[in-house]
Image (cartoon, grey):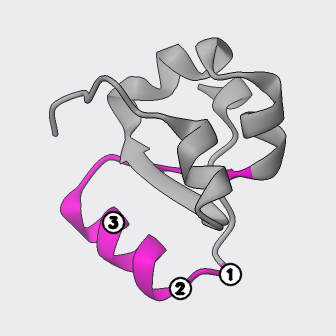
Amino acid sequence: MLPVGGINEKAAARAGLAAIILPARNRKDYEEIPEAARIALRFLWAERVEDVIEGALDPASEPTPAAAA
């Protein structure tokens, strides 16, 4: 997967989203996300397409902590 740019986490939180799925390569940018958005949203880091499907279909799955990356 390619990294993505321009993710507006605050907009996602305002839209009522509880979780956001991003490519694992973006994990390095986690600290740049505003703290309020990091608290409000659950981040799921996808290495493979299967991770996206699993995360989307199993909303109770635990996110991979960004700090562990």
| Residue at mark 3 to residue at mark 2: CA–CA distance | 10 Å
Residue under circle 3? Answer: 52
Question: What residue is shown at x 65% (from left), y 31% (from top)?
Answer: 66
Question: What residue is shown at x 67% (from left), y 66% (from top)?
Answer: 18
Query: What range is drawn magenta here?
Result: 41-60
Q: What residue type is labelled 1?
A: Ala
- Which of these two is toward me, 5 or 24? 5
**Residue 12: % across, % down:** 55, 52
- Asked whether the beta carbons under mark 2 and mark 1 sit within 8 Å of each other, the answer is yes
Q: What residue type is labelled 3?
A: Val
User: Does residue 62 sit above or below 65 in this rendering?
Assistant: below
User: Does residue 60 sit above or below 11 in this rendering?
Assistant: below
**Residue 54: % across, % down:** 40, 77
Residue 64 in the figure: left or right of residue 4: right
Residue 9 badge: none
Residue under circle 1? Answer: 60
Few, some or many residues within 10 Å of mark 1 (<14, 14–19, 20+): few
Residue 52 falls inside the magenta stretch = yes
